[in-house]
Image (tube, rainbow, N blue to C red):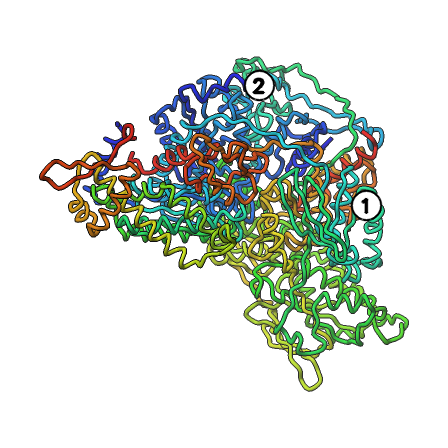
Amino acid sequence: MAEKKAAANEKPRIGVFVCHCGSNIGGFVDVPSVAEYAKTLPDVVYSTDNLYTCAEDGLASIREGIRKHDLNRVIVASCTPRTHAPLFQATCESAGLNKYMFTFVNIREHCSWVHMKEKDKASKKAKDLIRMGVARARLLEPQEEAKVEVTPASVVVGGGVSGMTAALSMADMGFPVHLVERDGELGGFIRNLNNLYVTEKSASETIKPLIEKVKAHKNIHLHLNSQLKGVEGFIGNYEVVIGTKGAEDLKAKVGTIVIATGALEFVPEGLYGYNQYPNVVTLTEFEILCKKKTLPKLKNVAFIQCVGSRGQVKSYCSRICCNVAIKNAINIVDNYENMLGLMEKSGTVVEKIPVETKATDEIMERRRRRRGRERGEEGEAEEVKLGPSEKIEVTVFNRDVMAYGVEHELTYNKAREKRVKFVRYTTDHLPKVYMEGNQLMIAYFHETLKLERTMPVDMVVLSTPLVGQPDAGELSQMLKVPLGQEGFFLEAHVKLRPVDFATDGIYVCGTCRGPADITECATQASAAASRAAIPMAKGYVQAEALTSVVDETKCSGCGTCIQVCPYGALRKNEKGYAEVIVAACKGCGCCGATCPEGAITMTNYTDAQLLAESRAALEEV
Amino acid sequence: MVIGGGIAGIQAALDLADKGIIVHVVEKTPSIGGRMAQLDKTFPTNDCSICILAPKMADCFSHPNTNVITYAEVVGVEGKAGAFKVKVLKKSRYVDESKCTGCGECLEKCPVKVPSEFEMGLGVRKAIYMPMMQSVPRVMTIDKEHCLMTLKGKCGNCKKACKREAIDYEMKDQVLEVEVGAIIVATGYDVWDPTTSTEYGYGRYPNVFTAMEYERMINAAGPTHGHIERRSDKKRPQKMAFIQCVGSRNPQVGHPYCCAVCCMHSTKEAMLAREHHDDMESSVFYKDMRACAKGFWEYVERAKRDYAVRYVNSDATVQENPENHNPIVVYDVGGRQQSEEFDMVVLASTLIPRKDTIELAKILGLKLDQFGFLESTDRILENGRTVVPGVYLAGYCGGPADIPESVAQGSSAAAKAVETLVQAGV
Amino acid sequence: MAEAQHAISEAKHDEKAGSWEPKIVGFLCNWCSYAGADLCGVSRYQYPTNIRTVRVMCSTRISPHIVLDLFKAGADGILLGGCHIGDCHYISGNFYTEKRVRLMKKLLEDAGVDPSRLRLEWVSASEGEKFSKVVTEFTDHVRKLGPSAVKKQEAAKAKVMAADDASVTFRLRALVGKEYNLETKGNVYKNTLDKAELEKLIDVATMDEFERSLILVLAKGKSRSVKELGSIMEVPTDKVLRHIVVLRQKNLISMEHPEGFTPTYRTIEIGGEQ
């Protein structure tokens, strides 16, 4: 790299690589003509087009271009720098070019994909954008990056299954972890639940070993009744303030932060008689009744799915509620007596349900199965396993049964075998819950039969979605990580970075990033632990050279910049001039835009670069 | 060691390598990338699949701590957590990886055409080939099953064409012995072949496709350069049907589970059809619309609202109008049978364990579940941990998972592997 | 030079064809609005092709000088995109952006440019659709306003030049730099200032600085009398004279007073023109 250090003083030799991105750009922008045009721009000595610049052959063409044409500046015109800049910068570096001599021009997200029906204009815009990039590239200077040490310790916010799993994983990898839990005990949302999936074991027994391991681990510092009160610093060097009820605030130095604050259930105020009729409860409340064995005597139970979700109040599907409802349906069919408050455990009654009362649904169900086979061959009649008792009847009103994957689908099948009825409804015909005298009733529209029907029920269970924690917004502001419109944390990339935040050093897992079942939470948690362990195991991160620079010859020492810097990254030096603390500076540029003397500029975003780039947009071709 | 170079394996490898751990990645095919590399776009953002994957593939290959062994299989494992000895059969590709630049001069000269596996048989490749343009590593492979030189000792065109003298017909298979502390299995899935299930007419009716075929077809780099074409007359269809749960949620064919991704990929594919041509009309025949992860339901709503995708809640079977080869979809609404003619049918064929999973499970000592997926010891809290300490699972080989789940599982398996290495004092 | 010639011939061509297209520059912050624009692309929400975007780390990076310089260079519209208030990746950057945009708009107004040619919008990383709506709406708006007068009228250009010069004066930069803190944290005596009062103060200062800058622009290379300046600027002569007194104290303008003639003033030029 040293041999290219002097690049700033050399005459610029710019190479432009225009990407087709398959047809993503090539289909809407005349890429070859854009690459041709680039050759006419000042200081451009080489220009070409690649089918995929990001593929190995595209990268090879950059490396080769740098060598063959002695390029000291590289421009890639393709997608967004937010995902691909690191790749191309690394490619430049591998060919001996300082990564700050690279310029990214976005002609996909900002051009081909948003102008899909105007190829001429989109091509012209792509040329303009490249001209702007060239104007910027000509003024670039190589930069050195500061290496920042990483404190090999972490803080995990939230002591539910996700938080505990993440903490345990990092602790097992040998890193000290502060685990901060708001409540007086560990376990989180799971503590409400009766059992998980269809298991004999109670939920609390299932997670007991996890809690014990966390409590006993020498690397885990547990802070119960505590909250994260403040965060300062940046990746590798955070100073967090942990506030514990009845104790002094504790300050801790950590290198990474994992957010696992979980979610709450949506309260269906005003929906389906909730808070109006006594036996209308939410799914979580129902679990609590089961868990505490305080279920009232029931003959008919109805679950209503998607209460307040999928376009009603909340736009999203909460992923887990169908499966939780199915589990509970099976539980009460199989094990109803065990959950009763008063009724004695009576011996299990195995008795066949009189077929005629169920005829229509049975036949419909058989028809559906049969149609799948279609060919004459019928196969053996399926053995129908009956529930142990006809005393309880369970109906699940649903819009779609989200029994995805292996486990959930099999459980769903099991529930159907146990004669749990699944009745589909649509948003055009929502079920109605009302009282007829002393009897709780449900009116619904049978979508298959196209009939209005009513049925008496003893209890209605409303499956409501998970919603983000009400104070997630505060945490989001404290940590400067984004919260989505639905109140869940927004990961860096929906596909490929599910547990990272865009901000380095902070990670997310569990239901605070969106509804997920316990398996998924635990997986995400150890994934987050893995991601957080990367900088901690390495011991350092390379800080980007994107900071303010003070020109002492212009500085008057007025101190305005010190007032506006949100990071305290500026101070007065002994000569009375402003001075930048590079490790604390994040490169926002506020001081630069403020400085009354115009004495401050930003590396890699100088006034001259910004003006050259934007002024080039106004030129006519 | 990571077995399988798809997205789950790549993620696991990168997570380990970034922590300073040496990782061997063993990939069966000539290129890493896996299934995700075959997809056109990804839901729910319609991000171009290869665009977001390619940087990771390049990273995985060129990382100083990784050793990517392609065209290779694990054939034996000895030892225990912290000290495994793995035998890797590196099949001869008859091309010197250090010399080949992937320039493609040999391709023009090779006289043998073979249906391309990567293109799901819709396109052809030569006997010397790279599975895709973005292959990593970017080197050719000779398929000895079809190469005239390896079969009959006649031809040699590619050797003549190769300026870098990379072709070596004498190259032998090699068995490498690698010592590793932990093993991550990420071998992915196979697409179920719906030929055996006659009600969909796949294989008999030309204009019935599988979703994976369709993905290749709409891909700009695919066999039809992104044009949607009927097999019967190469005409572009206008009325499309997508049939869900083909071979899944269906005990009769042995796949009672839900494959967990096809509601979404069919929605995506229907949207993409409309994106390609304004007049495309798509209908999705489904049992339950399982759009149940972050942003998925909103995506389906968008498909209905902005892309005029029609959703029909019904099982469906396929017949054909023999005159024009138009598939006819038979379905029911409110118990009444209906039929409707379409130009093309795309089957969301279920995803099943790779057929060599049983063999691999034997080698590693792993258990299979009743459907042939590799089994975790505890599906609740320890998904991905197996009966063999030091061996972990990631991605679809352990059961249905979409891309972000596979990525999370890749990272998660990496964490478990590091825990093991730390405990073993490696 | 060659570029300039191109510009002229192209402009003529455009006029002939009557196919004027607004030129709009967008400055987008990396974390929210640029990401929102990315999502807009990923989601394929379409918008007019006129905008050319420049990525900055934070909207707070954009000083008034950058915006006014672009208007001087003939931009028809400028869009600034930042994170929503409270969501700034850099904690408080967009508070300052808001204050600066107020100054920019005031200066544009003083310079006779419709301040709605400058627009500040908060677009988050998840608001792809909003980005397309904002750009579409803004492009239509600028199209309705017509081409910037700067390209055709010297007088209009002089005013924008003066506004640009005013924007870099120590007084305005210091005032606007301190405005947010004066309002929220108070001055050295811990007195917070009333928002309306502070704005009034800044508006007066802005007008003063603009007029002084305009005098300097108009008297650059050409001696002018107070009366002449007053009539061009449409400012009462006594006010012009007051400005000239200040400018003379700062040694920015010189007086020429041949006997028997009205005194005229000429801008003192340091170094060559940029």
Amino acid marked by disc 1: Thr
- On screen, residue A138 versus residue B145, left or right, reads left
Query: Which quarter of the image is occupied by the N terminus of chain B?
Result: top right
Q: Secondary structure at mark 1?
A: loop
- On screen, residue C221 versus residue A230, left or right, reads left
Q: Nearer the viewer, residue B37 or C152?
A: C152
- Residue A98 x %, y %: 52, 24
A228 shown above or below A290: above
Label 1: which residue?
B377
- Residue A525 x %, y %: 71, 46
Residue A200, by quadrant, is bottom right
Q: CA distance from mark 1 to mark 2?
A: 44 Å
Question: Is there any visible trace of residue B60 in the rendered image?
Answer: yes
- On screen, residue B239 versus residue A277, left or right, reads left
Question: Is there any visible trace of residue B237 in the rendered image?
Answer: no
Q: Nearer the viewer, residue C235 or B413?
A: C235
- In front: label 1 or label 2: 1
Label 2: which residue?
B100
Query: Which quarter of the image is occupied by the C terminus of chain B?
Result: top right
Give the residue at the far bottom of this rendering: A437
